[in-house]
Image: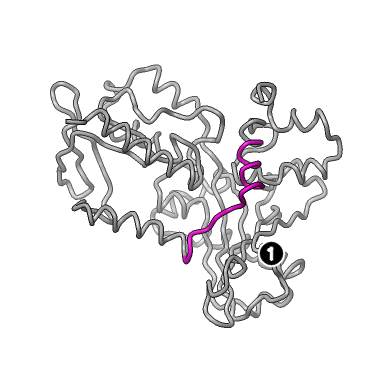
Amino acid sequence: MGKLEKLSLEQWMSLHVKDPDVKYCMAAFSGYYGLAPSNINALFYAIATGEYLVHGGQYYKTRSQDLSDTLAQAIEEKKGKILYNTMAEQILFDENNAIKGVVDSQGKAHPAKAVIANCSVPVLFDRLIPKSLVPVAYTKKIEEKNTSLSSFVVFLGLNKELSHIKDYEIDLSFKANRYDNILASQEDLARSDIGVTIYDNLFKGYSGPGKTTLTVMSLADYGPWKKFQKDYFNDNKVAYNREKNRIAASFVKRLEETLIPGLSDMIEVMEVGTPLTNMFYTQNPGGAIYGFDRDMEHLATRTPVKGLYLASAWSHGGGYTPVMMAGREAASEMLKDFKS
């Protein structure tokens, strides 16, 4: 394990494997972690992938939305209040640089002794906190981190059950040099490898009788979408929609040719999410879906700003499990600090 900690996944595999197709199969989970084999730490990959292979994946029944609903219910049962569609605009401090509240997007101030932030760390320290309160070394540490990839997802509702497919998660590779582009095509996202998730194969009854719900997705770099950003947020989406629909059509066509014959005629509902969609709903820079790139070091829950705690993918790494651990740790640390 000590040896793996010093190696990338690519370096580790190369000690034992030469065939690029075998490497591709071994590194297939790279997409889950958002880093290419040459960048992801071998020990992290081995532990995370080993856990998955031994214990398998889990899904919230009936929908992942049920987790959010349950958390909301718990907050409200404890007399907490949730402000929906309301952004935090500024964290307020007193003359001793202690947190005294938060101002929301409506200009209303909410008194507080502490803040647990699950927004993006760059936005938090860029816009919500006076820079004079953040140590230079901590700012530099944040600036040195890389933002993770985003995603392009086609959501499909079909008017037919897919009885000929039993698996629920399928990766489709189309490129001869598949190993070099394991995360996403560097030339054109429309030609990228794609991952397919058929939710009705997770458990019977996910969709209504005679229906199927699935997603087709690829990780995506934000770079090619940056040119649409200004128009997108000004609600001028003609060029953006053209590109979004072109890529989505390619995903559907290739899925139809390789896995689901007649797919186009089955589609009742289709929605498409892009890196700009992710940015719109999360305010994450570049529409990042994992926060910062996943590596062995994460930001501590406690920050140099007294009373400010981090609990998100940006501090503890992307994915359900790290984020839930971050929330638990933030609550624990805050309760220790403010125990009366």
Residue type marked 1: Asp
**On screen, residue 177 above or below 6:** below
Residue 50 on the magenta segment: yes
The residue shown at (86%, 39%) is 19
Asked where in the image residue 183 lies, by quadrant, the reply is top right
The residue shown at (37%, 40%) is 328
Q: At which x and y percent is residue 299?
A: 44, 29
Residue 269 on the magenta segment: no
> Is 298 left or right of 21, judged from the image as shown?
left
The residue shown at (27%, 56%) is 84
Asked where in the image residue 148 lies, by quadrant, the reply is top right
Colour scheme: one colour
**On screen, residue 327 above or below 239:** above
> Is 324 left or right of 133, judged from the image as shown?
right
Total tally of numbered discs in the picture: 1
Crowding at dot 1, Cα within 10 Å, few <14 / some 14-19 / many 20+, comes out as few
**On screen, residue 141 above or below 64:** above
> Is 38 left or right of 328, judged from the image as shown?
right
Q: Which residue is mark 1?
A: 167
Image quadrant where one finds the N terminus: top right
In this rendered view, identify the residue nearer to me: 39 or 211: 211
Q: At which x and y percent is residue 171?
A: 70, 56
Q: At which x and y percent is residue 120?
A: 40, 39
| Magenta-drawn segment | 46-62
In terms of secondary structure, where does tag 1 sit?
Answer: loop
> Is 82 left or right of 152, judged from the image as shown?
left
In this rendered view, identify the residue nearer to me: 225 or 36: 36
Image quadrant where one finds the C terminus: top left
Q: Residue furthest right?
A: 19
**On screen, residue 233 above or below 199:** above
